[in-house]
Amino acid sequence: MPTETPTRCPVCFISKRADFDVPVFRTSDFGEILHVRCDRCGRFNMTRDAADKIERLTKNSLFSSWLRTRSTDNTDLGTIISGDVERILSAIPIYSVPEKQLLLLRHLENKTLYPSQVVRFNEAIDYPINWSSNPEELRFHIENLTQQRFIQASPTGLQMLTAGWEYLESNRQSRATGHQAFVAMSFSLQLFPTWQDAIVPGITNSGYRPFRTDASPDLDRIDVRIMTEIRRSRIMLADVTEQRPGVYFEAGFALGLNIPVFWSVREDDLKNVHFDTRQYNHIVWRDKKELKEELEYRIVALMGKGDYVPTSAA
């Protein structure tokens, strides 16, 4: 069967144009799987049914931001099927205006090799980097940060100014009184319901804000972003279900910074927990309800009730 080459991405609808690199969009030899390379969304594979469902959505920019981040991290998502679409969207956080501007500053920080460097980017392509809905929203954030003298815009990109560096440093120093809870866990689609229905409400109900790096738009090496976000976090949850080495690494890094780590594992995977961490008291959960309730209880018991109030989606 011949390879099909549509002219636009099924998520962001970016079309074949001469002023930037075009996406490559092709079917497999079986004519069922779409293999997409998009400058805006990144690389991903999905079924035709999933692509058709996404085209009917009103939250395509959120999906685009999620895909861009995961593609940059080189995370193997497998093939996204129709049933995964709602699960992914339900796990995506809603960022406030100040949070989006902070995320843009962090992106510039991570991309800057020396203080006077101008970081190149294209508003039409790169607006997903801070979860903006479109280039106009990204432009709003840039103008606001420029007015605050945090950054300086030029025809070729953005440059971080001294006030921007100082703001980021003060933000890191405020971790001790912050409400971020870093979540280290497997990013497999099979555990999305656990994240959505147990971990998010369990942590939120205890007064803290759950954070996963796969929801962050910073387009930089994943290890740099992980270390940055762990340093900013008040607590960590390390769910070792599926035994991902990265979860153990992140938990060890947090322990080295004296950040409290809460451990959890699904009951059927308890026997596989690494012997170096078995001395820690794990939340051994059988279902989502059990994990949510036990997580909330332990965080409040150890840390006290936090003051985080989630922002409602507009």
Image (spheres, grey):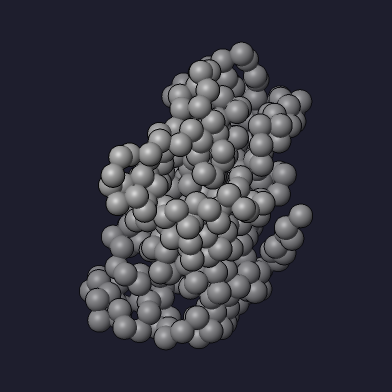
Q: Nearer the viewer, residue 175 or 245?
A: 245
Q: Quadrant of the C terminus?
A: bottom right
**Left or right: 3 with respect to 135?**
left
Side of 252 relative to 117 (left or right): left
Residue shown at the point (51%, 35%) measured from the top left? 8
Image quadrant where residue 234 sits: bottom right
In x, y percent, where is residue 271? 25, 81
Quarter holding the N terminus?
top left
Which residue, as the protein is rendered here, is positioned at the far top?
155
**Depth check, front residue: 293 or 65:** 65
Instruction: Determine whether 86 is above or below 122 in the image.
Output: below
Position of 196 relative to 68 (above/below):
below
x then y, percent, for residue 107: 53, 35
> Horizontal and vertical percent for residue 260?
47, 66
Q: Horizontally, is 141 left or right of 249 in the view? A: right
| Residue drawn at the location 41% of the way across and 41% of the way down | 36
* Number of numbered discs on residues: 0
Q: Look at 50% across and 72% down and name the residue there.
A: 193
Does residue 40 show up? no
Quarter holding residue 312 = bottom right
Q: In the rendered view, would you say 108 is above or below 279?
A: above
Write the residue at 43% across / 48% down: 70
- The one nearer the camera, 10 or 195, is 10
Q: Position of residue 139 (x, y in %)?
A: 70, 29
For this view, does 198 lie left or right of residue 43? right
One can see residue 63 in this view? yes
